[in-house]
Image (tube, helix red, strand yellow):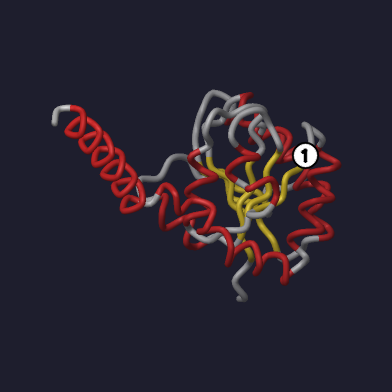
Amino acid sequence: MLRRNVLLAVGRLTVQKGFDILVEAFARAAPRIPEWDLKIYGDGPLRSTIEQRIAANGMKARISLHGVIADIASIYRSADAFVHTARYEGYPNVIAEALASGLPVIAIDSPGAVRDLLGGGRYGVLVEGENPDMLAETLVSVLNDREALGSFSRQAPGAVTENDLCHVAETWLSLFHDLISKRCATNV
């Protein structure tokens, strides 16, 4: 059996995370992206509602809920693309993790840092609003474009280099050095 492509989503199963939008969009896109499956990792109060929505859309064979997993890094490494449908999000760590793992990202352009993390579209595709039809069209367009997927995958880690431990440490050390230099210069 051939390996199927995995579109990954990660988050708490709540209204905020927009998995209702994602399930509807994926169901609409599914006939045009036949080699892709959607795997959702996370748990929460809307699990049964999302399961019902998956069943109602006839997507039990293509959309699966996997709950919480301790080694999420291995899940990122085994996926082929990442989707984020939160209605709002301060700083979406899941997008940073996906980018660090080299995953192409498709995300709803919601309030918060999504646009900044994706470099305004440089590191991933932004979808306007809570529109399942628009998200479905974007999924079809991006997931069927191997060149775009490869380009986003190669560029993705660059989006989070400023969060690299060495970069953060060097920034702090530079700040401390400057502060000490200024303080010592005024004491002379």
Q: Is residue 69 above or below residue 61?
A: above
For residue 111, side relative to residue 145 (left or right) = left
Residue at (81%, 52%) from the top-left corner? 29
- Across and down, in percent, residue 81 comes to 62, 57
The quarter of the rendered structure image containing the N terminus is bottom right
* Count of numbered badges drawn on the protein: 1
The quarter of the rendered structure image containing the C terminus is top left
Q: Residues within 10 Å of mark 1 (few under 14, many from 20)?
A: many
Foreground of the two, 121 or 145: 121
- Across and down, in percent, residue 179 comes to 26, 34
Foreground of the two, 78 or 138: 138
Residue at (59%, 64%) from the top-left corner? 153
- Across and down, in percent, residue 106 comes to 68, 49
For residue 46, side relative to residue 178 (left or right) = right
Foreground of the two, 16 or 164: 164
Amino acid bearing label 1 = Glu
Residue at (43%, 40%) from the top-left corner? 68
Mark 1 element type: helix
Foreground of the two, 63 or 178: 178
User: Outermost residue toward the bottom?
Assistant: 1
For residue 12, side relative to residue 176 (left or right) = right
Residue at (79%, 44%) from the top-left corner? 135
- Across and down, in percent, residue 64 comes to 60, 48
Question: Can you identify the residue that label 1 sits on?
Answer: 24
Q: Is residue 155 above or below residue 113?
A: below
